[in-house]
Image (spheres, helix red, strand yellow):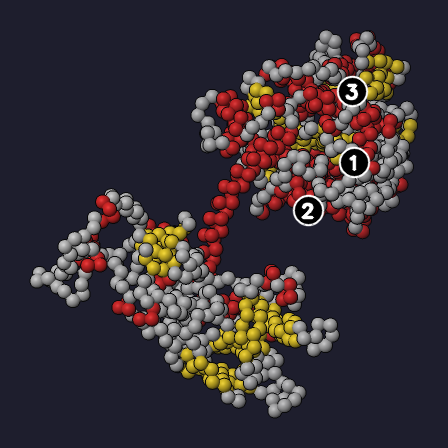
Amino acid sequence: MGSKGHYRYHWQSHNVKQSGVDDMVLLTKITEDGVVDNLKKRYMDDYIFTYIGPVLISVNPFKQMPYFGEKEIEMYQGAAPYENPPHIYALADNMYRNMIIDGENQCVIISGESGAGKTVAAKYIMGYVSRVSGGGPKVQHIKDIILQSNPLLEAFGNAKTVRNNNSSRFGKYFEIQFSPGGEPDGGKISNFLLEKSRVVTRNPGERSFHIFYQLIEGASTDQKSNLGITNLDYYFYLNQSGSYKVDDINDRKDFQETLHAMNVIGIFADEQAMVLQIVAGVLHMGNLSFKEAGNYAAVESEEFLAFPAFLLGIDQERLKEKLTSRKMDSKWGGRSESINVTLNVEQSCYTRDALSKALHSRIFDYLVDSINRAMEKDHEEYNIGVLDIYGFEIFQKNGFEQFCINFVNEKLQQIFIELTLKAEQEEYVQEGIKWTVIDYFNNKVVCDLIENKLNPPGILSILDDVCATMHATGEGADQTLLQKLQMQIGTHEHFNSWNQGFIIHHYAGKVSYNVEGFCERNRDVLFTDLIELMQSSELPFIRTLFPESLHAEKKGRPTTAGSKIKKQANDLVGTLMKCTPHYIRCIKPNETKKPRDWEESRVKHQVEYLGLKENIRVRRAGYAYRRVFKKFLHRYAILTKETWPSWRGDVKQGVVHLLRAVNMDQDQHQLGKTKVFIKAPESLFLLEEMRERKYDGYARAIQKAWRKYAARKKYVKMREEASDLLLNKKERRRNSINRNFVGDYIGMEDRPELRQFIGKREKVEFADTVTKYDRRFKNAKRDLVLTPKFVYLIGREKVKDGPMKGQVKEVLKRKIELERILTVSLSTLQDDFFILHEQEYDSLLESVFKTEFISLLSKRYEERMQRKLPLRFSNTLEMKVRKDNWGPWSAGSSRQVQFIQGAGPVALLRPSSKTLQVSIGPGLPKNSRPTKRDLTQMRQQTTRPQTAAFPMRAAPPPPAGSHQNGVIKGLHNTSQWPPLNSRSNQRIPYQGTMTDRPSLPRPGSNVKDKHARIQHNLDFLKVPEQGAAGKRSGMTRPNGGNAHRHMTSRPTPAGGRPKPQPKPKPQVPQCKALYAYDAQDTDELSFNADDVIEIVKEDPSGWWTGRLRGKQGLFPNNYVAKI
């Protein structure tokens, strides 16, 4: 992802080109020039994000960057900070995880001048949080509203300015509300100071709000006819600035997005139509012009009144009257009366514009309220706030709007200083941490200059006083304001005045404001006449936009725009101070709005006023992480046995113990009075990594147990479903009815020579080596593979020519689409044969895993065909063979397979020219079903002897020429044993009787009988006096005992030395494995020859319960000998 092409560098954290430093805390020289140079290096290599500790610096690239896709979302989700390159997703993920882990509200403050990329940053944060948080349909609806609110509010609140093609002309604080589980389930938008004046006037080269241009470009023919829509230059409100089109904005397409957003949010079609009708009404209102008629104003062309009156649902004459005259209340001698005052041209134009601004502003408020109603939640739990507010603005001519915008940005800078510089240093002092004080500019003095009430009063207070005493529009009030400002705060170090206005020394630099229109825009009064006019509309929707009660008694001063924005700014500060803040500082690299254009002086100015150098110095001198003792101990308690699950004792001592346990260096942390401070981020990452490993270990154990349980459940279900296909139709093999299903028996993942025939994205459902019979009933091995779409038969052939001549190569013999399968035929006996009937010709196959294959084939067939796979059961099966072009079998014909009852479990084949006879002994009854074993019993069977469940099959026979449980196998008739199949799960049942083996105690036998049996068997312990060697076979004593050999002299046994201590007997009976055994089910033991197994329980079934290497399970007793 480098500047010279994607082939050079990759976005991943490994193998990337290093451009400057990721975190400017690591800069060698901390100067403005050093910071600018580092940002430039990264910007030119397309790295737009850089850190200063937790603060993210974002430089506007003025182009779409390639690293905002699904891959990056996955990369940053749950990743530790600094694990990946700096990114807005890392900040968003950190914010989201902190909210869930700490249970604290979070907010992100995005600041920077107009055009620096704040709105786009806010969109990426909301998009990321929406993507990584879970939830069902309701949550998805909230997510859709969150995401669709952006294009809707941008249409009505954003505009092209000389500095930004999509400038937010309003401020918004978007709270995304979450459930305790982290799913977004509500939200709330607070909007600030919409720049209403843009509806009626703007600077040259700028546009009004996007919605006006979207409507004209994107409206349908019917809409244009109904709303009176024509060309852009027809409307006075749009043709003043001479700017209609924007290069990177498609108004026609955006109009459709705006309508779609209204649908998502839940605004009904008739309400949408009314919104657009009012937008059109505002445009037509602007085309009303006035002329002098005897010192008074009159509408110049009355035909222009028709459309706005029609669209707003008001009387045309009444509209003309209210625009050219005003009702005034006058008090005289204690009495009050109303008189109509005729307006001049200037006043009429002002009235027209006031109504237009009010209509657009109230539509905007209606849309915000609609979004809030759609996301409304009964009670708040956790939230993440995203502040996207207009950036700091300095134009050639700066008016009241710029003054308010810059005041709000000054307040945000104050929060940044309070929380990152001032608060940090004060915290070190309070906690008693060793610290070197760093100087910085505190802009509180500028905030006080603007918003102070008294001693001295601020600019907003002086402005409100002037507005309260003014009676007319014009320059008089504005000049009075300028005189009062000079008189009351003229000596302030951050204030200067000039002949047309005043200058404020903001944190971002000096800004000169022109006082023209200050008082009028601050009053922001909508005259009573205009409210009455709108309340007389025949359209209920418009009446609801003007709900004022005109007859209520007015008390105190009216609310001014200045006092309103001051209250909103302070409320916003209060909201943000209750959250854990995160910061994005956006930088605009040029004024050309072109990629890879770097204006050094512009960037340096922003670096200076954003205070990045001071931020780096405080960060380097301070501690990267601090936490209250209790929270720190709670988060990392899992790292030691003493602190998990809870520490008993003083929390500070618990923190000390934890830090010692992880061997953190003394110089990497300090303990304050209530908090622990950790210096380097790397030390914190080490703690996080250790914590993750602990949780990962526990999670793996839980997952393993769950997967084992789920697999058992799945296999039981699969066995039962497969068994249902054959139930009452076919005899079952004793060794297959309880067998687990594996699916892939030939390891397709490691067989590329077979995978080459399978589609890349095809999932292998079943794979096994089977026997295939041709028209002459000659057998050949084939690899049978089942996928959701096809059945494959893969064989092998010798290469006849070429460089690989003589070598055996895999060949695709047959590929059958599931749709082409007509039916599957099987016999009613226990054999393994089945025939796949296809439209062209049939395939006769033999597989020990036929039940599993047919079960999976049936499922996939039903999914594709929406009907069940036909299965036919008969002991005489017909098979259609393929046509050949030579020999006596050239014509396509059929073959017959006959099944007859024989003896033994192995099928005997007798082929003839057109018939194959298969003889096989009886199997399990047709109504046999798999043994149902409760999963909890399967785990606990060894501890419940009374209810233990054992396999229905007999224990498998040991290999030929061996002995069973200490008895020589040759003593039994072994001729009936066929050779063992090479497959571990092909089991041949033991067919001897219970008298052929030693009797074993039954689980129900009582203790008394057991003792009696032991007493009876103690005779072999009666050893003769001469020792065991002295026993004579032919001599008996009169009492039935053995005779003694007569010896006159005997040596002392062992020379009189004491006997050695006998080897302690094992506490539990044991047995030794005579041959290796591979477990065939999840509840069995696997063992090697000579392994010693502890016997937990013996059972007459031949399946004993034992313990080996910490695992307990079943094993066949004829594979072991007791020790």
Residue in the picture at 27% in, 60% down: 1000
Q: Is residue 851 left or right of residue 141?
A: left
Query: Disc 1 residue type?
Result: Ser
- Quarter holding residue 273: top right
Please report whichever mark, 1 or 3, sits nearer to the chain's N-terminal start: 1
The residue tagged 2 is 70
Please report whichever mark, 2 or 1, sits nearer to the chain's N-terminal start: 1
Q: Real-space Cα distance between discs 1 and 3? A: 30 Å
Which-is-in-front pick, marks 1 and 3?
A: 1
* Front residue (pair 815, 333): 815
The residue tagged 1 is 19
Circle 1 crowding by C-alpha within 10 Å: few under 14, some 14–19, many from 20: some
Residue in the picture at 77% in, 44% down: 9
Residue 319 visible? The answer is: no
The residue tagged 3 is 507
Circle 3 crowding by C-alpha within 10 Å: few under 14, some 14–19, many from 20: many
Name the residue furthest front: 1049
Figure quadrant of the N terminus:
top right
Query: Disc 2 residue type?
Result: Glu
Query: Disc 3 residue type?
Result: Tyr
Q: Residue 612's spot in the image, x, y percent?
A: 76, 24
Name the residue furthest left: 1038
**Element class at badge 2:** helix
